[in-house]
Image (cartoon, rainbow, N blue to C red):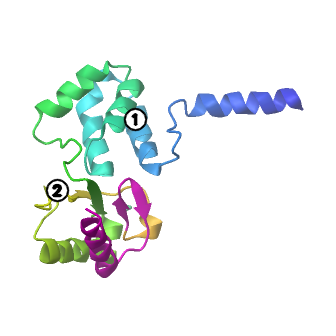
Amino acid sequence: MQTKEVKSEAAKAKKSPSDHPSGDKRFKVLDMTMKRNQYRQDALIEVLHKAQEAFGYLEEDVLLYVARGLKLPLSRVYGVATFYHLFTLKPSGAHTCVVCLGTACYVKGGGEIVKEIEQKFGIRPGETTPDGQVSVMAARCIGACGIAPAVVFDGTVASKQTPEVVVNRLAQYQKTE
Ligand code: FES
């Protein structure tokens, strides 16, 4: 019995060697992309592209995860991420807000959320409020379609968001300056 349990734990560990300890589903999306490319190092750009779609931007944590997955030095992954203009590194705002604009979230109001942010704060995805408090980004499916529209505030996924709730939260960030 005990041997069986030990075995199944080992099997689990083998099945997903690179599972992220946070349990964040977006890392699963990355796992799938790396697996589909058989962890080939020349798939780096495609994997980074997927990472940006899932996270909205490339944070160091994500770059590290990709480096480990593809067995590449972090410096190489960092170099590629900074060289190509299509990649965005962590934005400069004190807080980040990533609005999912994947199909499920878009049809359930993700687009309205972006419009409301633009109206209230005058910034579009990829921009930061002039006071440096909030950077807004867009993602294309963060793997949480069941709770659409989803918005990620400072790395935490929030479900079924409305334009009003989102702008209120961003306004709070500005007040706590
Ligand atoms: S479309 Fe937004 S989580 Fe999938």
> How many labels, in total?
2
Pick the residue in front: 44 or 129: 129
Read off the residue under disc 2: 132
Q: Residue furthest right?
A: 1
What is the secondary structure assignment of the residue under circle 2?
Answer: loop
Identified at 25% across, 21% down, the residue is 75
Residue at 25% of width from left, 47% of height from top?
57
Q: Observer-nearest residue: 120 or 133?
A: 133
The tag on residue 36 is 1
| Quarter holding ligand 1 | bottom left
Contact flag, marks 1 and 2 (Cβ < 8 Å): no
Closer-to-camera residue (5/170): 170
Secondary-structure class at tag 1: helix
Residue 169, percent across and down?
32, 71
The CA span between labels 1 and 2 is: 39 Å
Residues drawn in magenta: 150-177
Percent position (x, y) of residue 150? 38, 66
- Badge 1 amino acid: Arg
| Residue lying at 34% horizontally and 23% vertically, measured from the top left | 40
